[in-house]
Amino acid sequence: MRKQFMSIFISVLVIATTISIGESLQGSTINSITQKTSNTTTLLNPASQDIALIFGKITDLQRYDTYIRFQAVQLRVITFSPVSFTSYSSEEYFEINKAHLGLITKQFIFSLTTTFIPTIDCSVDDTLDRLVIVAVDTDVKWKNIEVTTDNSKVAWRVYTFEGTPVDGWNSTASAITNVNAGDYLFIQFNETTPPTDVNVTFSYTPTASFLGIWAINV
């Protein structure tokens, strides 16, 4: 009965408020903002945000002038464009706009809001067959970055700026390190193939959001 009531409540809340809060939140983030504090630098940009319903247990709640930051304990995230439902329980970091609808306490959140999507800038090194991280927002974990390519014969692996693999081949799922400037994605073909362009796509799994696509000549 409790689960049924919660489902009905969520449905009513989403239908009744998605349009109005979407207009309100978009209006509150018209200008790009750079918020710098002693322990984080966060870029809030209208092009880098998605509306989402977030609910569940959280920890390490921090409130800043324009955004709220916390870590997941047992968290559920519903996004609407694209539609997705994802669970998090490994202390993943989240950042949301301070303008939100719902309840946020030190240990619990139930909120319809805009979620932060990290910005990652990369450069292509065709000579070494690498995609190199040039700049990235703080506290972005490699395990939350989904890497895909458009060639099934390609194998790739992510390395830290020191040359240490963050996970096995074709995977970031078990990576425990943050994404840092100087980290790189190395690409090779599984068989002898003439040089060709390979498109590499990064997506951010907490909000199922596209981060960027780069062409590497391998």
Image: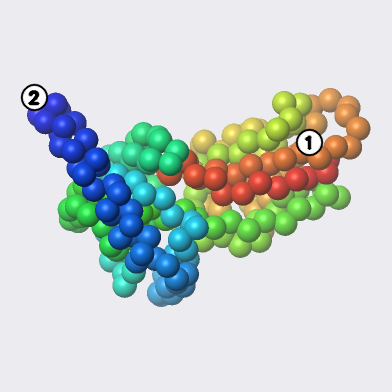
Horizontal side of 8 relative to 127 (left or right) equals left
Horizontal side of 124 relative to 91 (left or right) equals right
Q: Position of residue 176 (x, y in %)?
A: 49, 45
Q: Name the quarter where the C terminus is drawn.
A: top right
Q: How many labels does the image show?
A: 2
Q: Position of residue 2 (x, y in %)?
A: 10, 29
**Relative height, residue 52 to residue 135 (above, below):** above
Horizontal side of 111 relative to 78 (left or right) equals left
Q: How far apart are marks 1 and 2 (CA)?
A: 54 Å
Q: What residue type is labelled 1?
A: Gln
Instruction: Mark yes or no: residue 218 visible.
Output: yes
Q: Where is residue 186 in the image (x, y as percent from the top left)?
A: 73, 43
Q: Quadrant of residue 119?
A: bottom right
Label 2: few (<14), some (14–19) or many (≥20) C-alpha neighbours in 10 Å: few
Which residue does the image show at 23% across and 48% down from the upper left?
17
Secondary structure at badge 2 equals loop
Which of discs 1 and 2 lies nearer the camera? The answer is 2
Q: Name the quarter where the N terminus is drawn.
A: top left
Q: Where is residue 81 in the image (x, y as percent from the top left)?
A: 43, 41
The residue singled out by tag 1 in the image is 188
The residue singled out by tag 2 in the image is 1
Which residue does the image show at 22% across and 54% down from the upper left?
101
Q: Label 2 near label 1: C-beta < 8 Å? A: no
